[in-house]
Amino acid sequence: MTPVETSAREAGDPHDVQGLPPLPASLQARLADCHTLPSLPAAVAKVLMVARRTDASLFEYAAAIEADPALTLRLLALANSVFYARHRGEANSCREAVSRIGLDATLAAVMSFGLSPSGRAEGLDLDAIWQRAIIAALAARHLADRLCPEHAGTLFTIALLQDIGILAAEALDGDAYTALIRATASHDALCQAERERYGCDHASLGAWLAASWGVPQHLASGIAESHGELEATSPDMLCLRLSGQIADGWLTQTPGRAFGRLIRRLETRQELSLTAIEEILDELQAQLPSMAELLEITRPPQRDSHELLAEAKRHLFMQTLALGARLDAQQVELEALRERHAELERSSRLDPLTGLANRAWLEQQLEERFHHSREHGKSLAVVFIDLDHFKQLNDRHGHQLGDRVLANFAASLQEMVREGDLAGRYGGEEFLVILPDERVAGAEAMARRLAERLASHPMAEVDGAPLHVSVSIGIACIGDTDFRNARELIDAADQGMYQAKRNGRGGAQRFTPRA
């Protein structure tokens, strides 16, 4: 049994590690049958065995590393690199290197050296994966120095290892997975595609893989949580998740646009100013070359932080202008929709021929006003109007003339009513007028004015001769009797109208309750 297999066995079932999200059962079964998952060299496995002990000392870390001369040399090179330039003098021993770097960062460095991109996973662009890893690790460290210094070493380690799940996914699906990477436009899009394919993203796979190697549980849990949202997170989690976003922005072909979007997302977080972000980008630019050389990967692209943020601000300004234009357009569209809605609502209340209120709106309004008048002790009158001999007029002259008569009569009726009154077509040649705060005398006066207008104004012409019409009118008032509802009030006015017709038409009759 190899040291790596031993360390995995001693770590136990990674699915049982407290704090790790469970993987889908189908994915667990596939991982159990996969014999090409990434493994670690024996020297790295020994360091991991030390790291699993909470009481491990610097001496024990150094002793485990010194067993591999190549590993020792690379660790010394890291300790004496620009990244740790604040320390005076050179680290000349493995113990001095571990002391300078810190335990978590030492573990990250050892694992990254052990997962050297050379000769592995031919279908993957390992250069791109490790470029993102070192940018994220450095960004996480510098972010933590400002927001949560006590977590700087741990966050460096987690950020450096946050994408190792990609190696596990490639081991499972080979070319199919690399095709998935090529088909996605961004790291976030890749994670979404992975969730659809596997039921989890490569952060969860990476946590599983790290646990299988025996990485301490807090580091494995951090890997699992590394690809979440920036909002509503603790400072240390913000540093971790933001580190990957910074790496994506650094590596994209349009970094100004990417950092513009990132700055917009950070507007709600007060911990980081633009000045702090610019300083972090400066530090990245200074330290990336040596880190890339240590990991033996292609140096990431150069970025001028001042120019990068200036371009980001320009994109933000243009986005703000575009957003303002869209909001203006949406406001215009909203106003138009409101006007159309109001017009539809108005048209739903109106009779299309006469333009007066239709029957449904009349009855609804009368019901409301009836109850209001009863509750507040106010008067209310209704006037029920029927055009006399209208059927004969239609039969003799046709419906077109009849419609013209109805429309002209409606216009005359509308001129008779006061503001606050409501006139409408009740059906056919019948019309109803609601008169709030009016008694019988006022309704009778309105009926007389209407009769006088009809006598002096023809409603149409027939063969050049004026056509006058007369109406029969019924009047009912809320005080005439104890009406129980608006329907009874209309029926009473209707009875008054029929009494007017029996009296010879062309007149008005007040409803008189039977004794």
Image (cartoon, helix red, strand yellow):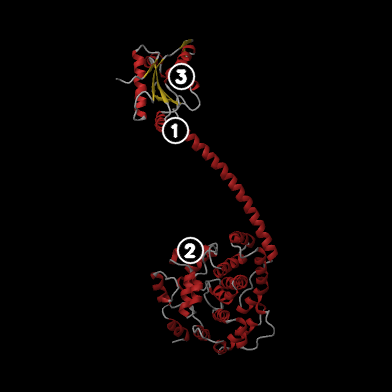
Amino acid found under the numbered disc labelled 2: Ala
Task: Say what secondary structure mark 2 lies in.
Answer: helix
Task: Say what secondary structure mark 3 lies in.
Answer: helix
What is the distance, in whole Å, between disc 1 and disc 2 at their CAs?
Answer: 49 Å
Q: Is residue 40 visible?
A: yes
In this rendering, is residue 192 above or below 361?
below
Quarter of the C terminus within the rendering: top left
Residue 253 position in % (x across, y down): 62, 63
The disc at residue 409 is 3
> Which of the two residues, 220 or 119, is positioned nearer the viewer here?
220
The image quadrant that residue 151 belongs to is: bottom right
Amino acid found under the numbered disc labelled 3: Phe
Earlier-in-chain disc, 1 versus 2: 2
Q: Which residue is mark 2?
A: 193
Amino acid found under the numbered disc labelled 1: Ser
Nearer the viewer's eye, disc 1 or disc 2? 1
* Extreme residue toward the left, this view: 515
The image quadrant that residue 156 belongs to is: bottom right
Quarter of the N terminus within the rendering: bottom left
Q: Residue at x 50, y 36 (%)?
A: 342
Residue 345 position in % (x across, y down): 47, 35
Q: Which residue is mark 1?
A: 348
Residue 250 position in % (x across, y down): 62, 66
Q: Residue at x 59, y 81 (%)?
A: 102
Q: Is residue 116 left or right of residue 26?
A: right
> Which of the two residues, 193 or 49, is positioned nearer the viewer here?
49
Q: Residues within 10 Å of mark 2 (few under 14, many from 20)?
A: some
